[in-house]
Amino acid sequence: MFSLLSLALAAVVACSPLVPRDTVTSVVNLSNNTGTPAHLASGFIYGIPDTANQIPDHFYTDIGFNYGRAGGAQVPAPGRGWIWGLSEYKVRFASALSNYETARKYNANFIFLIHDLWGADGTQNSTAAYPGDNGDWASWDAYLTQFIADINANGATAGLSIDIWNEPDLSYFWTKGQTQYLQMWGRTYHRLRTAWPSVPLIGPAFAGQPDATNTWWTNYLSFVKSNASVPDQYVWHMEGGGGDMQGAYGALYNMLQTYGLPIKPLNIDEYATYTEECPAGSAWWISQLERVNAHGLRGNWLSGWELHDLMGSLVSKTNAATAYTETGTGYYPNGDFQVYKYYYQNMTGYRVGSQPSTDLKIDTYATVGTDKVRVLTGVRPSTTGTWAITIENISAVGLATSGTLDIHTWGFPGAGGHFGEVDAPTDLGWYSHTFSGNSVTFPIYQTDTVTAYAFEFYVG
Ligand SMILES: *[C@@H]1O[C@H](CO)[C@@H](O)[C@H](O)[C@H]1NC(C)=O
Ligand SMILES: *[C@@H]1O[C@H](CO)[C@@H](O)[C@H](O)[C@H]1NC(C)=O
Ligand SMILES: *[C@@H]1O[C@H](CO)[C@@H](O)[C@H](O)[C@H]1NC(C)=O
Ligand SMILES: *[C@@H]1O[C@H](CO)[C@@H](O)[C@H](O)[C@H]1NC(C)=O
Ligand SMILES: *[C@@H]1O[C@H](CO)[C@@H](O)[C@H](O)[C@H]1NC(C)=O
Ligand SMILES: *[C@@H]1O[C@H](CO)[C@@H](O)[C@H](O)[C@H]1NC(C)=O
């Protein structure tokens, strides 16, 4: 079944060089060098087993894993966090510390989620305490004292950053409104800044993207300006199934002007819906994040111990889909994993700028290596249809402005979905395109909703 599918796709991709006139196009500009690749999208939230070394090293190193984020969410009793008492806090801290140490083993950065360590991981009951309830900060202050001491005792500040609270704009994680949230932000920022002058304090990690009509954003930006508690990275999430990075960053940029705030690095520390976590969606998100130089961590849509395993749905393991056990092994890569592996290992040299199609449904990420130009592309699921890619200024890589260009196509199938095994991309062969005017345009026949493609040709 797998090889038949590959043959069918090869036929589809190679069948015609003609692009219908009204086809929407993503454009790559080979003369726009945008710098050295740092595979900015190669992070994921949770996804690391609490047992060290359970997932073999090569799964992390193959994809250049570079950003983790955890805080013991959903560790069951007796590990439900601070609001259940010090001993439950300690079990949860041990989970997060283990994940931190795994991340550091691969030299990855690690974002500590202190709302999860507190216990507000979305499973807390309706009467659970939040910082500053009834104007009383004693428990939160004691919690931060304990947390700072435990991080220091474990020498765990290298590569560390702190997300001060996750998605306070959603009632899963915060039910006490904006005023109490902002007081918590200001209090916590200055406390942690004093404790660790060089640990990045990041936020606001809103579920909602920047938007001048969103009062969580406007009140936050106004507050951090007046409170001298501007985050070291601007963080938000892109998990609503809509939006795009240029639009979202543009809105943030305008608001930073309005509130007189500095430009800072961006971190989308949860990106992609569960449906978007397929090869096509992964390629689309990589393209979006790279364009605006945002760090990105894949969202994690699994629960319980599966949340603490499977690398944010990049790997699976024996029986995971049917009879999951947290200590089970037999890991294997899925289709998304192959996209991230290619992105890290093959897309070397320098990046070049690109633009998504005007309908925002197809996007490209491209690099120019010493050997080849490589263009990774994907549609935003769940979409099928015909799009095109235009590669402009071919002479910038030492080729003629017209003639024939031989392009090698790889398919990245999503066979079996999140729990399916895919061990390599599929070689879809070479196709010759005639071109002129220093640019080439070729069609993408997206006949399923999940396959990503890479196109390669030799530089001159
Ligand atoms: C491609 O990038 C170059 C260099 O940044 C720029 O001068 C040129 O205008 C760009 N071409 C298009 C069509 O945007
Ligand atoms: C709700 O959670 C708190 C911990 O935040 C706990 O002390 C309390 O007993 C829980 N209430 C119920 C009804 O489970
Ligand atoms: C920032 O806000 C917190 C919480 O209200 C407050 O304790 C702190 O004094 C404020 N700091 C500054 C510099 O305004
Ligand atoms: C990517 O690079 C690796 C390491 O150089 C190589 O083994 C592999 O064949 C390349 N993959 C593709 C699809 O070109
Ligand atoms: C180069 O590409 C970047 C990233 O896509 C884009 O922001 C920039 O506007 C492009 N520059 C030119 C001159 O086209
Ligand atoms: C094409 O690339 C060449 C070489 O980098 C550059 O000099 C030229 O300005 C580029 N033209 C356009 C239209 O981008």
Image: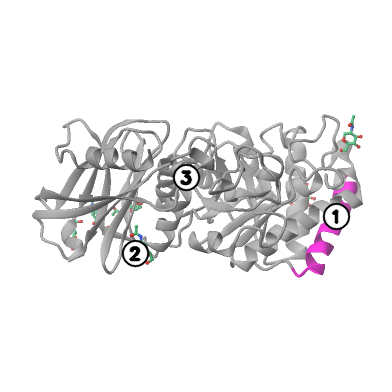
In percent of width and height, residue 58 lies at: 54, 63
Can residue 231 be seen by looking at this rendering? no
Label 2 secondary element:
strand
269 and 226: which is toward the camera: 269
- Image quadrant of ligand 6 equals bottom left
- For label 1, count other residues whose C-alpha is less than 10 Å away and answer few (under 14), some (14-19) or many (20+): many
Residue type, mark 2 in image? Tyr
At x 55%, y 54%, the residue is 43
Tell me, for residue 122, which label it has, or none.
none
Which one is closest to the eye, mark 1 or mark 3?
1
Tell me, for residue 249, which label it has, or none.
3
CA–CA distance in space, label 1 to label 3: 38 Å
Q: Determine contact: label 1, label 3, CB under 8 Å.
A: no
| Mark 3 / mark 2, whichever is N-terminal | 3
At x 24%, y 37%, the residue is 12
60 and 34: which is toward the camera: 60
Residue type, mark 3 in image? Tyr
Give the residues in magenta: 137-155
CA–CA distance in space, label 2 to label 1: 45 Å
Label 3 secondary element:
helix
124 and 165: which is toward the camera: 124
Instruction: Tell me: 8 left or right of 129.
Output: left
| Mark 1 / mark 3, whichever is N-terminal | 1
| Mark 2 / mark 1, whichever is N-terminal | 1
Residue type, mark 1 in image? Lys
